[in-house]
Amino acid sequence: MAEQHEILSISEWYLDAQQKISRLNKASEAYGLTYDQFLVLEQIIELGNNRPGQIAKKFNTSPPAASRKLNALQNKHYIMKAHNVDDDQRTVQLEVTREGREKYAALRDVLYQIG
């Protein structure tokens, strides 16, 4: 019985989280972002995780999946990829553009209001 209650509790938590994510994505759409893309910008701007490998690790995803996330932001001109950092051609550093910072800040303010 306790095990069944735990499973139901996890199910309720999951469904609640899905509803919250849906609301966050809906709010993000008005700014040309998904909530996931907002989180990537947050990692770069607020936490200094400005390497693709750091993004992959933080999101617990593969490097190719992280690259797809970053390419979507780059295609929207919200980030730039700087190559040949520290005289190493393999090194890529992520930089958020002015437009990306503006979108991030505006959406962040809205999300704080949503709470």
Image: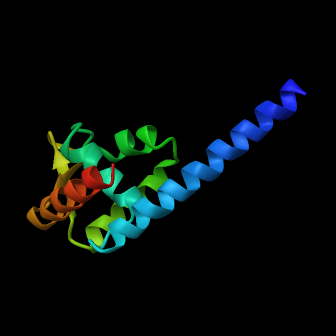
Nearer to me, 22 or 70: 22
Residue 77 located left or right of residue 59:
left
Judged from this view, the residue extending furthest toward the left is 98
- Residue 19 in the image: above or below residue 63: below
Q: Residue at x 42, y 38 (%)?
A: 58
Nearer to me, 39 or 68: 39
- Residue 59 in the image: above or below residue 111: above
Residue 83 located left or right of residue 61:
left
Nearer to me, 32 or 48: 32
Judged from this view, the residue extending furthest toward the right is 1
The quadrant where residue 5 appears = top right
The quadrant where residue 38 appears = bottom left
- Tell me where residue 57 appears, x and y as whole percent: 44, 38
- Tell me where residue 84 appears, x and y as whole percent: 18, 49
Residue 47 located left or right of residue 24:
left
- State whether residue 32 appears in this view: yes
Judged from this view, the residue extending furthest toward the top is 2
Nearer to me, 101 or 19: 19
Q: Residue at x 23, y 37 (%)?
A: 47
- Residue 75 in the image: above or below residue 54: below
Q: Residue at x 30, y 73 (%)?
A: 32
